[in-house]
Amino acid sequence: MSTTSWHAPHDLLEAYAEGRLDAVLGASLERHVESCAECRAAIRPLSDLRLLDDAWSEVRSRLESPEPTRPVRLAQRLGLADSTGVLLSAATSLRLAWLTGSVVALGFALVATLLAAGDALWPFLLVAPLVPVLGVAAAYGGSEEPFEALAATTPYGRARLVLVRTLGVVIGTLPPAALLGLFVPGPGWVAAAWLGPSLAMVLVLLALAAYIGPWPAGATLALLWCGIVVLSIRRLTPTWPVEATQQTVYLALAAAAVAVLVVRSRRTHRIGVAL
Amino acid sequence: MNVTLAGIGKDYGATRALEDVDLTLDTGVTGLLGPNGAGKTTLLRIVATSIAADRGRVRLLGQDPSAGHGELTDIRRGLGYLPQELGYPGDMTTFGFVEYVAVLKEWDERRARHREVRRVLDLVDLSDLSTKRVSRLSGGQRRRVGLAQAMIGDAALLVLDEPTTGLDPAQRAALRRTLDVAAHESTVLLSTHQTEDVAALCERVVVLAGGRIRFDGSVLDLVATAAGQVWLADADVPGAPVSWRTGTGRYRVVGGGRPPAAEAAEPTLEDAYLLMLGPEARTPLPA
């Protein structure tokens, strides 16, 4: 019901609907329209309902849609698709707790390396390559888990989802790990050389997980890597696990893992078993 | 036909879950009724492309799901699936969970995706809880979140495994209205072990027991199979195939011939269902 005898002239309402009024006049008119049924009725046909609907929709989206995690926001600024960001925000590996845990583990490994006498690099070399591997295993989701069963029946597909989650782990763990690697004593190339076995193990994990599951695959690789590092401490040089000859082996393993994934996804006609 | 199953079979180790199942479905709501272990979930998972059949021929939305990745993806674009148990990862909100599934269903454009999420949340009356964490919702509310994600994109094939679990009568009535609308354009296949759900929600009923289809027809036709075989007696009837004491204190007797001094009763869907299920129907077949 109208509570005033004054009514806004048509051209004023039109200017308001078109967004041509300044903030003070606009706010004043809004106040009046809120309490004046006649002016509300007069402004309705002047309003662009689609624009209003879009604006209201955007307000609701801001309120209802979950805020992407910090690493995802960063990745989106660098060009990551909005929809992929939604998937990554939900990935365990990109949650703050996981990231904090990863960085703390790497930090301890770095401190242990710095405190160790001489050129002992083993604490860092033991931990750093395994952080992304275990991150991928955690982000995988077992095929029998209730949510994974649903995800497997969507056009996006479980295999693609696993690969996106893997990308999430790489986004989330590699930059801090690479940064900490710069402080590792010894030859400078070690700071980057651990990425070779790490990325190879991520691919082998993806290939192996299709057969034995992500966690057994992750555990197998962790044990193997620990064995290699321990062997190098006792019998070989501290940098042996990441030296050039071994890097070619990791490259070959990575290529073999990719081949297994490609062949498996092409040959299998069973539903939802590519990864 | 949106769904054609011919001679479908599925084994889990030594247990035969489904054997020689033939089923064709077009638009409308079909209820899959059967006791626990009858093979309902296995059948729904095959129709939802979650698992493959071991034997037989499957065609969904005009395509063969085992033909290749492209065909499978095409089918999944027209599919909405509510699994019997649905996990809600981590600390997702109602809106966040449905949006996540919307992305998996290729709703890539943000504004359109948000509108669709709001539409399906409205359908299941959960708009007011969109920012609440799913882990803090009641069982019935969570079930409705599951229904909302299945409704994304007006799926041509809706596969709902026990959608009424945890819903109160008002919510069941709302679900019925929603499915009625969906069934004009879509094929809806839902499972339940509640006969009242089938009577309320479905025009067609398929009774599954021991991995085989025991009945396939309209609800009224199923009820008619019990005509002349239901009685009300003043005392319990030893040896009757099925009998129980009703709220009025009289005994409802289904099958096995008319007891002395009993009066005939109008059969219900539950009577027909119980009459149809023999003890052997509850036991999985050996592979």
Image: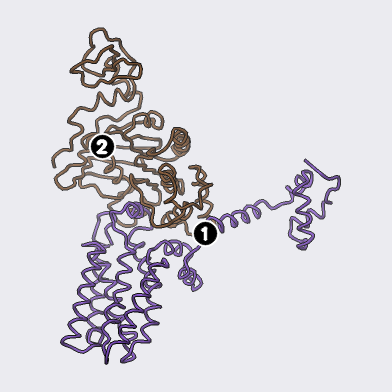
Which amino acid lies under the numbered mark 2 shown in the image of this protein?
Answer: Asn
Q: Is residue B154 above or below residue A262?
A: above
Q: Nearer the viewer, residue B30 or A16?
A: A16
Q: Quadrant of the N terminus of chain A?
A: top right
Give percent across and percent down for residue A156: 38, 58
Which amino acid lies under the numbered mark 1 shown in the image of this protein?
Answer: Arg
Q: Does label 1 or label 2 sit earlier along the sequence?
A: 2
Q: Residue at x 39, y 39 (%)?
A: B166
Crowding at mark 1 (Cα within 10 Å: few <14, some 14-19, many 20+): some
Question: Nearer the viewer's eye, disc 1 or disc 2?
Answer: 2
- Residue lying farthest top? B261
Q: Residue at x 46, y 53 (%)?
A: B133
Q: Chain of mark 1?
A: B
- State which quadrant residue A267 falls in: bottom left
Colouring chosen for the image of the structure? by chain
Indicate which disc residue B27 carries: none
- State which quadrant residue B276 falls in: top left
Give percent across and percent down for residue B260: 23, 8
The residue singled out by tag 1 in the image is B110
The mark tally for this picture is 2
Visual hue assigned to chain A:
purple
Q: Nearer the viewer, residue B49 or B248?
A: B248
Mark 1 touches mark 2? (CB < 8 Å): no
Tags 1 and 2 both on a single chain: yes
Q: Is residue B187 above or below residue A173?
A: above
Tell me which chain appears brown: B
Q: Chain of mark 2?
A: B
Give how far apart the Cα atoms at labels 1 and 2 are. 41 Å
Is B134 left, or right, of A13 in this rendering?
left
The residue singled out by tag 2 in the image is B36
Give percent across and percent down for residue A65: 51, 57
